[in-house]
Image (cartoon, rainbow, N blue to C red):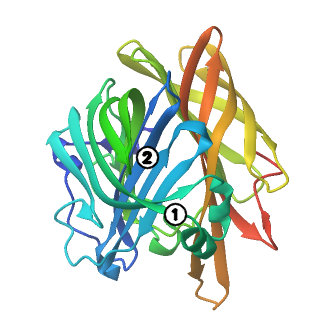
Amino acid sequence: MAGGTYKTVLEPSDEYPHEPDAATNYNESMYLNGFDVDQEVGGWFRLGNRVNEGYAEMSVCLYLPGGRVGFMFGRPKIDTNTEMRAGGLAIDVVEPFQHLKVAYEGDVVLLDEPADMSDPRSAFRDNPHASCSVRLDVRGISPMYGGRTVFADGSEVPVDAEKSFAKAHYEQHTKVTGTITVGDEVLDLDGLGLRDKSWGPRHWQALTWYRWIPIAFDDGFAMMLSVIGDGAGGSRNSGMILDGAEYHKVVDCRIESDWDDRHHQTAMRCWARSETGEEYEVTGEVISLIPLRNRRTGPDGVEQLTRITEAMTRFRCGDRSGIGMSEYLDQVVDGVPVGTDVG
């Protein structure tokens, strides 16, 4: 509840696709990541159904030994929102809030220098491709965090589709096991990660910038830290700490980052305070980063460019070592990501 005005609802049926809103930019997406701490390998997978626009956004990103990345992105055509299955990637619900399966059959481009993806056309043309097969089981190790915000009486909160990133969103820390095969290379994954789901209207340009950091240290200690620019020079800071089998809400956090000459994050220093009053200091060191982008022509005819840097990152909190992601989104104005001077 927020001041008795709103409440958050989440039902097992929300694990499955919803009836799309009328908004042209309706998006229903599922995202999952998983990393093996000892091997420092893993990956993330996303399907975003934009059925009212006739396509899905499909992404497969694999962090391979030695800093290499295997990557594939596509916009396969879809005409229904009844399943999360497109472009060779499938995400199936075995048991809501408990067990998902991820499968991929297709190609990936192999990047010895993942930063090459700043120019996608050249990256896909100039680097080798390999066949890829993924079979993963994703099992929850935590409660669910988030859901759909409604008024206290259960009625819908109005959403401005042009300014929306999602009307509903939830996350969960997970255990991820299975096999990733790239060409002749086979990775047996026994790791931890985080998965999320969102639905509702989305433009990637709806937010000025954000820093999203999901981390797993072990199956009883994990966290997610989120800092979102508010467009007015400030930020909204939130997240959660998994302590045993229970989530504690993050009431405040900070993320300070180091950058290279391409404005890619290389390291970060994080601080968070939970609702219990406990404080956490976390340091991160990027292992491997790939820059991605989204382009959209706005209502005024001006092209808008969004950059998202996706980095497998090594973390420490006290004497604990973990692994996870540092995902940084920035709108790019005059060639500069707007959030790099504040987060």
> In terms of depth relative to the viewer, which is nearer, 122 or 158?
122
Three-letter residue code for mark 1: Pro
**Residue visible at 43% across and 46% down in the picture:** 44
- Disc 2 on helix, strand or loop? strand
The crowd level at tag 2 (other Cα within 10 Å; few <14, some 14-19, many 20+) is many
Identify the residue position indicated by label 2 in the image. 44
Please tell me whether residue 282 is drawn above or below residue 187 in the rendered image.
Answer: above
Please tell me whether residue 335 is drawn above or below residue 105 in the rendered image.
Answer: below
Q: Most extreme residue toward the top, as rendered?
A: 319
Quadrant of residue 49 in the image? bottom left
**Residue visible at 36% across and 31% down in the picture:** 189
**Residue visible at 60% across and 68% down in the picture:** 123
- Please tell me how many numbered marks the rendered image carries: 2
Three-letter residue code for mark 2: Trp
**Residue visible at 82% across and 48% down in the picture:** 260
> In terms of depth relative to the viewer, which is nearer, 95 or 106?
106
Point out residue 313 in the picture as x, y percentages from the top left corner: 61, 34
Question: How far is disc 1 from disc 2 in space, using C-alphas?
Answer: 20 Å
> In terms of depth relative to the viewer, which is nearer, 104 or 225?
104
Q: Is residue 10 left or right of residue 266?
A: left
Q: Is residue 103 left or right of residue 171?
A: left
Q: Which mark is residue 128?
A: 1
Quadrant of residue 159 in the image? bottom left
Q: Is residue 315 left or right of residue 109?
A: right
